[in-house]
Image (cartoon, rainbow, N blue to C red):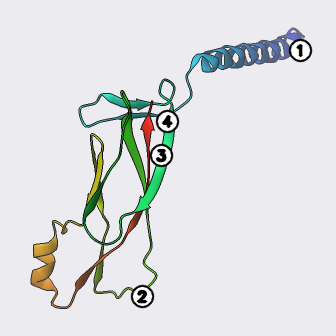
Amino acid sequence: MAWEYVVPAVFVLLGICIVLYQHRKRKKAEKLAAGLQCWNEKGEICFDSTVNTTKVLGSFNTGTHNGSKTIQLGAGEKLWATVNYVTPSNRIGIEDFLKIPRIVISENVISWTFDDFAIDSYIRNWMWSYKYVNISANVIYGVCL
């Protein structure tokens, strides 16, 4: 007879524990910052959207040749960029290798190069009919304030 009361009481206590756990979890989540953080190769935070604000300055297309673009920066501004690669409109053969531009940001200059693949010499030994196809990229750039 005593078990008739014990089992429901256990379920009630379990329910109360779950509610309290969820309430405490929600309070902790309210204290967490929401945003994006990026680190450089040294492990230092180079961008923190919870602290920094950004401004988009413009965009450009790299074309299919090496190049660079100099951006005018104000005092204390850091340059950033995001890249969207453009799919070629012409047909690409199975023997074609796509080369995407390598984007580098240095101070106030965004530069891009179409470097050869590291595997290039290996491929040359095994394939006799191939060509590289440079594909362009759309670059959106701005500053962290």
Which of the two marks, 3 or 4, is nearer to us in this view? 3
Q: Secondary structure at mark 2?
A: loop
Q: Secondary structure at mark 3?
A: strand
- Which of the two discs, 2 and 3, labels the residue nearer the N terminus? 3
Q: Which residue is mark 3?
A: 57
Would you say 74 lies left or right of 15 here? Answer: left
Quadrant in the picture for the N terminus: top right
Q: Give neighbour class at mark 1: few <14, some 14-19, many 20+ (Cα, 10 Å).
A: few
Q: Tag 1: residue type?
A: Glu
| Separation of residues labelled 3 and 4 (CA atoms) | 9 Å
Q: Which residue is mark 1?
A: 4
Real-space Cα separation, disc 1 to disc 4, in angstroms: 63 Å
Q: Tell me which numbered mark, 1 or 4, is placed earlier along the sequence.
A: 1
Q: Are marks 3 and 4 in contact (CB under 8 Å)?
A: no
Residue 80 on image: x %, y %:
39, 42
Q: Which mark is residue 54?
A: 4
Q: Nearer the viewer, mark 3 or mark 1?
A: 3
Q: Amino acid at mark 4?
A: Thr
Is 31 located above or below residue 56 in the figure? above
Residue 47 screen position, x and y as percent: 40, 32
State the image quarter where residue 95 is shown. Answer: bottom left
Mark 3: which amino acid?
Leu
Where does label 2 land, which residue?
A: 91
